[in-house]
Image (cartoon, helix red, strand yellow):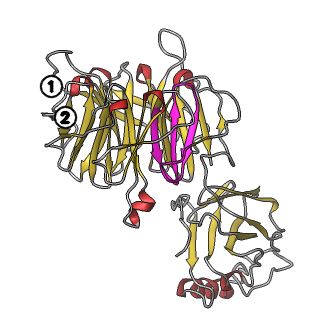
Amino acid sequence: MPPARRGVKTRRGAGTFRAEGEAGVSSWIRRACAVAALSSLGACGGHGASSTGPSAPQNFSVAAGDGQVVVTWTPESDLQYWIFDAAGAAISVSNYFNQLYAKVTTPAYSPQIVNGLYNGVQYAFVMNATKNGGPAGPSTPSIAVTPRLAGGTSPGWTVGSALPATLPGGGSADFRAIVFGGGIFIAAGTGGLIYDSLDGTSWNPVFNGGTINVVPPITTAINALTYVGNLFIGVGDAGTVIYSGDGVNWASTTIAATNAANGTPNLRGIVQASTSAYVAVGDGGVIFTSTDLLNWTRQTSNTAQNLRSVANLAGILLVTGDQGTVLTSTDAGTWTLRAVPAAVQGLTLRGSTVDTYSAGLGIYIYAIVGDGGTILRSLDGYTWTTQVASPIADNLLSVFWGSRFVATSSAGNIIYSDDGLTWTSSTVSAPIGQPLNRVIFGNGIYATVGNAGANAYSR
């Protein structure tokens, strides 16, 4: 069985073609090379570089990532670039297609992310270029790197510049939510502010030349985001719901149902329960469901505790909240309170996740995090009897599994685990000192955001 592969999205605008197997080339490569030969491109295997073609790409570099690499070079605007890669210590354009996991990425744009790689497997990369459909020039030297898991100590985390967001009344915004979808990261927080990032490292209030806006405008805090069915959805204080198909233009509404004790409740979590239903949870034990994001129905939650998160984990809807509250459902209508160890019954539980790689093998590892470094582990999502030791005593605010478990804390610390049992403190480039409210994994990158614009990433 091959090792775990992480991050399978391909950069839009570039084509990636794969040939699996050591002996032989898939039919698409044969066709591609035949076409290249007829047009004298000389870019595919079996065609040597032409002395009349462009020079080899300059400053060619390959950096290992999580299930991916990032290829950079100094581009020229009138050239089309080709990246060749395969498993091994070295390749050339004339032999790469005979190697395991051979593929071509073209047209390629620096920096080019090459996804769909296996962590722990060494890959070799080489490049050349063509001009106006002419012959390929000489290739670069071959570079070999080995993709590896992110989020831990090697590599660790890089602290980014504070998100440049100022609230209308002054002061920096606290970012409480982050999500990855449609090739972009979206972060949101207090003041109704929404920022985007293409790489999880540089954040802006604009995207594709358009200023992010919400209609009607909102000033309430957004506490949670999700991405389902090509739709970004967020929920926040005072029953606020926002949604967008492109991450730029957002519509807003308010859940009309009220909580008799608290008025219109603050919403803390949102998830898609099925192809036709959404679930939002919040203060006072409220659980709402909707099929259109406009009309919401209050469900019986069997608790009055504030609910902090909701997730759809391998078919189980799992809610966490104050006083050690854990709720589960399989239909979003009937909710069951689950027992937790006595030591955490008075603590706030703030997030949950499941190891989706192990789940694909029929092994389910669920994790819940909370105050005082609380970590709970379960193998079925219903029985929460295993309390795991944490390397830190901070309140843990969020947890996510992308290629491993990663959790963030109220003191700006980050911890990780590969099995949900043994947790280790991650390496961070500089002290953060602010609560890191949410962490997400997308396109081979872990990204986290927090108070006063704090953010960090690991790839």
Q: Nearer the viewer, residue 269 or 366?
A: 366
> In the displayed image of the protein, which residue is found farthest to the top?
169
Residue 400 is left or right of residue 238, and the answer is right
In the rendered image, residue 450, in percent from the top left (x then y), is placed at: 52, 27
Is residue 158 something one can see in this rendering?
Answer: yes
Q: Nearer the viewer, residue 247 or 55?
A: 247
Q: Amino acid at mark 2?
A: Phe
Residue 53 is left or right of residue 320, and the answer is right
Q: Nearer the viewer, residue 8 or 57?
A: 8
Q: Which residues make up the magenta segment?
A: 397-423
Q: Mark 1: few, some, or many residues within 10 Å (few <14, many ≥20)? A: some
In the rendered image, residue 167, in percent from the top left (x then y), is placed at: 49, 15
In the displayed structure, 340 sits above or below 252; it is: below
In the rendered image, residue 57, in percent from the top left (x then y), is placed at: 80, 64
Q: Nearer the viewer, residue 120 or 107?
A: 120
In the displayed structure, 399 sits above or below 413; it is: below
Q: Secondary structure at mark 1?
A: loop
Task: Report which residue position mark 2 lands on.
Answer: 288
Spatial CA distance of label 2 from label 1 is 9 Å
Whether the magenta-drawn stretch holds residue 419 is answered as yes
In the rendered image, residue 452, in percent from the top left (x then y), is placed at: 55, 20
In the displayed structure, 145 sits above or below 242; it is: below
Q: Amino acid at mark 1?
A: Ala
Is residue 299 something one can see in this rendering?
Answer: no
Q: Mark 2: few, some, or many residues within 10 Å (few <14, many ≥20)? A: many
> In the displayed image of the protein, which residue is found farthest to the right?
51
Task: Report which residue position mark 1 lands on.
Answer: 257
Which of the 4 image quarters holds residue 128? bottom right
Which residue is rendered at x = 73% and y = 88% of the image? 46
